[in-house]
């Protein structure tokens, strides 16, 4: 029965070689390939190229943004370093001004203290001189009185004359000063 089917199939057709393609088959395959090639070239390749361009642009944009960010960070770092340097210089300047001001204040205080000391010393000297003068005046009057009384007892008469008494007292004090000056040498 198999032979019958094969012989019936081969009777209507000439014996076709399976290795040689049929012209119609070859045309259909070429037309299908051309349509498929047209679709790929017209629609798919542009989509791939568009996607590739977008990705390349995104990568280049990312690199550019990274470079810009790096440049901005470098500029910020330089600005920070400059501000730090300026701040240190300002701190040194303020410190030096404070030292100079402190030295000036100290010098002013020393000058004021020296002036006050000189004033107090001068007042003390004036007070001592005033007390010495008062003591000399008091001593002269007491010595004068004692000298006139003593001289009156020695002489035997009262020295009531004020001019004479003053001369006697002055001479007595002058003799005392010359004796104390000679003893001091």
Image (cartoon, rainbow, N blue to C red):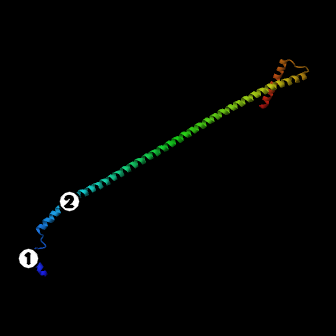
Instruction: Say whether residue 3 is visible.
Output: yes
Mark 2 closeness class: few <14, some 14–19, many ≥20 residues within 10 Å: few
Query: Residue 158 in the image: x percent, y percent?
Result: 89, 20
Identified at 35% across, 51% down, the residue is 65
Question: Where does label 1 land, which residue?
Answer: 11
CB atoms of marks 1 and 2 within 8 Å: no
Query: Residue 104 in the image: x percent, y percent?
Result: 58, 36
Q: Nearer the viewer, residue 34 or 68?
A: 34
User: From the viewer's perspective, is 48 left or right of 21?
Assistant: right
Query: Residue 37 in the image: x percent, y percent?
Result: 19, 61
Q: Quadrant of the C terminus?
A: top right
Up the image or down, 79 lies above or below 151; here it is below
Identified at 82% across, 20% down, the residue is 166
Mark 1 closeness class: few <14, some 14–19, many ≥20 residues within 10 Å: few
Question: Where does label 2 land, which residue?
Answer: 39
Up the image or down, 81 lies above or below 184; here it is below
Instruction: Say whether residue 175 is visible.
Output: no
Identified at 79% across, 26% down, the residue is 136
Name the secondary structure under disc 1. helix
Mark 1 or mark 2: whose residue is earlier in sequence = 1
Query: In front: mark 1 or mark 2?
Result: 1
In the figure, residue 38 lies in which quadrant? bottom left
Q: Nearer the viewer, residue 105 or 163?
A: 105
Query: Residue 44 in the image: x percent, y percent?
Result: 23, 59
Up the image or down, 101 lies above or below 37; here it is above
User: From the viewer's perspective, is 137 left or right of 108?
Assistant: right
């Amino acid at each position: 029965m198999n032979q019958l089917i094969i012989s019936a199939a081969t009777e209507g057709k000439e014996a076709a070689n399976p290795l040689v393609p049929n012209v119609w088959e070859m045309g259909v395959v070429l037309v299908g390939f051309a349509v498929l090639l047209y679709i790929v070239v017209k629609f798919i390749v542009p989509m791939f190229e568009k996607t590739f361009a977008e990705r390349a642009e995104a990568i280049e944009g990312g690199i550019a943004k990274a470079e810009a960010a790096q440049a901005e960070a470098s500029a910020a770092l330089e600005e920070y370093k400059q501000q730090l340097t300026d701040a240190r210089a300002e701190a040194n300047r303020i410190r030096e001004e404070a030292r100079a001001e402190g030295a000036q204040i100290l010098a002013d205080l020393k000058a004021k203290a020296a002036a006050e000391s000189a004033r107090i010393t001068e007042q003390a000297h004036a007070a001592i001189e005033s007390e010495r003068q008062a003591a000399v005046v008091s001593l002269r009057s007491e010595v004068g009185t004692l000298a006139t009384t003593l001289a009156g007892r020695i002489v035997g008469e009262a020295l009531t004359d004020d001019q004479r008494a003053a001369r006697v007292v002055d001479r007595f004090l002058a003799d005392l000063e010359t004796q104390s000056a000679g003893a001091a040498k």
